[in-house]
Image (cartoon, grey):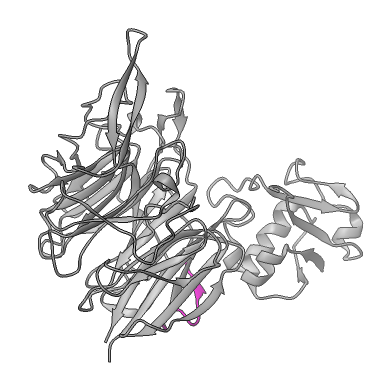
């Protein structure tokens, strides 16, 4: 029978949740790296027992941990992330130049084919790669140096490279996203990069149609259609059908609110904004079925009306239905962070997400109903799932 | 022999009990002790000092003989009591947060 392993990174350690394919009873392993922030954990598609974790601390910096037995034991590997050459500057919050400084690894994306090759998205934004199981990390400098890097400006959470999508049909193509620079694509294995933000519109930046500067929160892809991407941006959900060359808004009937933004002439213009949120993911077997968790606003960061609801679209966007069965529908004021949703590949597929309140919710029926599989963890930073045979 | 106290998280990381000892050649300084510590426990590299600049991480502090050495030059000789093992070098995670 299949098994499922859920990897949960939290503010105070890592947890490994395991169940058989029924997904009814869960064993919680951990905490691993107790007391440390674990921004992300992910398993190698080529060797599911090979896991990598980003362990970080404001006191003691960055560590990378590796497991070769599915998360039972771990060993620290290389933690030196040195920018290539002279790093230069990006923009600080006030627009002044600020030196590029490594702070932490936000996201680890193991290669689809080689358990020893992993990409790391870091703050301040850059992409690194190891080919020796994490012992040594080298920057792919073409991203940071492609031309707009000096204009990148951090989002409220920092200048983090948080999304890395590997095209399963083309090993030379990688998509990444940075808060708050936008989305980028390479078609030559990481040597050169181009911004892919056409169609994004951000009312809150000086040039709403700028090539870079958009606060992209998360991008998701279905492996059967790597040219189609879904994006949760600051205030919108978007999709592209041409590998990011153009995007269109598919927020549709998602909940939203009216927000005022100051204009150059000193007035305040109000916009009907929808669909603030962080996570987005795609159904395992239906490439047009996508999931988001709307959050009330960028200043409140909790679910609208205190009701935690996942929204599902079976039409690739625009038409959304709330999924609330089994989720708290009163007095719920948690957030769901950008790396905290994952989907298994069983049939029906399981959908998992974690909250800043320490709950991990799972649906065994593609979102129709939900149950908490962990309730009292530290604030959840990331959730990944492995479907094991 | 120089005695070094590590903060709890780093003892766990280095898989050591409370106190560790290192040997340094010549006059003991903060730099030579940290070099010896990292050579003996490579997993500590980057946790106390920046990998590249070797500057102290902001929330790591060094104390010995009831003195805060954190802002001293790393090449300042350590007190004789530390150099001869009578007193430990204390590495402390700054008390921060709530």
Q: Residue furthest front?
A: A330
Q: Is residue B96 left or right of residue A66?
A: right
User: Main SS of the magenta segment?
Assistant: loop
* Residue found at x 41% / y 40%: A159
Between A338 and B6, the one nearer to me in the picture: A338
User: Which residue is situated farthest in the top direction here?
Assistant: A265
- Please report the residue visible at 26 percent of the width from the left and 22 percent of the height from the top: A207
What residue span does the magenta drawing correspond to?
Answer: A69-77
Residue B5 percent coordinates (x, y): 78, 64
Percent coordinates x, y for residue A257 in the rendering = 33, 34
Describe residue A257's horizontal placement relative to residue A56 as left or right: left
Check the image and report above or below for A181 versus A281: above
Can residue A132 be seen by looking at this rendering?
no
Taking A295 as reference, is B42 left or right?
right
Question: What count of labels does the image hold?
Answer: 0
Q: Quadrant of residue A85?
A: top left
Residue A76 in magenta stretch: yes
Q: Nearer the viewer, residue B4 or A4?
A: A4
Residue A208: x %, y % from top left: 25, 25
- In the displayed image of the protein, which residue is found farthest to the left? A242
Tell me residue B94's x, y (percent): 73, 50
Quarter that holds the N terminus of chain A: bottom left
Residue at horizontal 41 percent and vertical 48 percent from the top: A303
In this image, A125 relative to B52: left or right?
Answer: left
Residue A158 is inside the magenta segment: no
Residue in the image at 32% along x and 7% along y? A265
- Tell me which corner region of the image, top left, top right, bottom left or bottom right, holds residue A304: top left
């Amino acid at each position: 029978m299949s098994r499922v392993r859920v990897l949960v990174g939290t503010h105070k350690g890592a947890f490994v949740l395991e169940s058989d394919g029924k997904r009814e009873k869960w064993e919680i392993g951990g905490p691993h790296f107790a007391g440390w922030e674990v921004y992300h954990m992910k398993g190698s598609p080529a060797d599911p027992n090979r896991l990598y974790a980003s362990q970080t601390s404001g006191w003691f910096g960055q560590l990378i941990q590796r497991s070769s037995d599915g998360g039972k034991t771990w060993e620290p590997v290389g933690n030196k992330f040195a920018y290539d050459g002279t790093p230069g500057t990006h923009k600080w919050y006030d627009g002044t130049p600020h030196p590029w400084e490594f702070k932490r690894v936000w996201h680890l994306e193991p290669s689809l084919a080689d358990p020893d090759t992993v990409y790391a998205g870091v703050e301040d934004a850059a992409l690194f790669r190891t080919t020796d199981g994490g012992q040594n990390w080298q920057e792919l400098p073409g991203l940071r140096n492609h031309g707009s890097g000096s204009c990148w400006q951090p989002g409220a959470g920092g200048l983090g490279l948080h999304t890395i999508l590997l095209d399963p049909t083309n090993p030379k193509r990688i998509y990444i996203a940075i808060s708050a620079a936008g989305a980028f694509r390479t078609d030559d294995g990481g040597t050169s990069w181009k911004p892919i933000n056409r169609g994004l519109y951000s009312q809150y930046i000086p040039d709403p149609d700028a090539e870079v500067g958009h606060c992209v929160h998360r991008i998701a892809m279905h492996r059967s259609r790597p040219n189609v991407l879904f994006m949760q941006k600051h205030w919108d959900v978007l999709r592209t059908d041409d590998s990011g060359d153009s995007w269109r808004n598919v927020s549709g009937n998602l909940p939203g609110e009216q927000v005022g933004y100051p204009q150059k002439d000193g007035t305040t213009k109000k916009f009907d904004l929808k669909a603030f949120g962080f996570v987005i993911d795609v159904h395992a077997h239906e490439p047009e079925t996508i999931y988001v968790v709307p959050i009330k606003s960028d200043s409140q960061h909790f679910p609208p009306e205190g009701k935690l609801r996942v929204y599902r679209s079976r039409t690739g966007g625009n038409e959304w239905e709330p999924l609330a069965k089994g989720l708290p529908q009163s007095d719920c004021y948690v957030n769901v962070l950008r790396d905290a949703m994952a989907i298994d590949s069983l049939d029906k597929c399981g959908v998992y997400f974690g909250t800043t309140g320490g709950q991990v919710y799972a649906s065994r029926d593609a979102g129709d109903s939900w149950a908490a599989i962990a309730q009292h963890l530290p604030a959840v930073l990331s959730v990944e799932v492995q479907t094991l045979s | 022999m120089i005695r070094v106290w590590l903060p709890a998280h780093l003892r766990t990381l280095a898989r050591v009990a409370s106190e560790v000892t290192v040997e340094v050649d010549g006059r003991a300084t903060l730099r030579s002790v940290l070099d010896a510590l990292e050579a003996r426990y490579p997993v500590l590299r980057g946790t106390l000092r920046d990998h590249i600049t070797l500057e102290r991480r902001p929330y790591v502090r060094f104390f010995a003989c009831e003195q805060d050495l954190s802002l001293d030059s790393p090449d300042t000789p350590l007190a004789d009591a530390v150099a001869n093992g009578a007193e430990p070098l204390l590495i402390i995670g700054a008390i921060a947060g709530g």
